Image: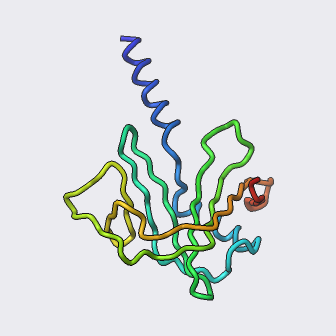
Amino acid sequence: MKKKIFLCLLVICAFLCLTSCDTNEETSDVLLTALQEEKIVDADLILVDKVSKIGTTLFYSQTTYYIYKDCDNKLIAINYDTNISSQNEYDYSVEVYYNVSVDNDVEYLNDDTTPESYYSYQDGKKSEYNKYNLENKTDYLVYESKPLFSKTKYTIKKAN
């Protein structure tokens, strides 16, 4: 009996360690504001799509990219990730893709088709390949501090 419980706990732990942890909507909004305050991204971004890369091979994984339009009508994509490894000092990692283009020839999947990995869009459509070409990536590390009697502060540093 103890072996079964230990095995179940081991499988759950492996599942949590192998899947990436996307941030929730509230956290992504806060991180976007911090990026805007640091002038890393435009202050007038408009969300145009939310793309999730879904992997269902051995373990379920999901990576979400928020696609924004800036004041010059250029697209950028941002991926916000929670740091689940206690070995790192930072609290979040952020990937910003400054050169995003749209592939208008992408083929969408039927509702009954679900490959091992696919992209899901805000409008409910799915495709095997991303309809957004993500280029010119810059990685940032976000450190969160919660001073006593003050609002949470975020320090953003460009990753090496």
Picture layout, residue 144 above or below residue 85: below
Residue farthest left in this picture:
112
Q: Is residue 40 left or right of residue 133?
A: right
Q: Is residue 114 left or right of residue 73?
A: left
Seen at 72% across and 71% down, the residue is 40
Q: Is residue 49 left or right of residue 46?
A: left
Q: Which residue is at the front of the view, 19 or 118?
A: 118
x and y, in percent, of residue 68 in the image: 55, 76
User: Total marks drawn?
Assistant: 0
Q: Which residue is at the front of the view, 109 or 24?
A: 109
Q: Quadrant of the N terminus?
A: top left
Picture layout, residue 19 above or below residue 75: above
x and y, in percent, of residue 152 in the image: 73, 59
x and y, in percent, of residue 100 in the image: 55, 73
Colour mode? Answer: rainbow
Residue farthest bottom in this picture:
72
In the rendered image, which quarter is residue 15 located in?
A: top left
Residue farthest front in this picture:
105
Picture layout, residue 33 above or below residue 19: below
x and y, in percent, of residue 101 in the image: 51, 76
Picture layout, residue 96 above or below residue 7: below
Seen at 76% across and 71% down, the residue is 38
Seen at 43% across and 60% down, the residue is 52
Q: Which residue is at the front of the view, 24 or 43?
A: 43
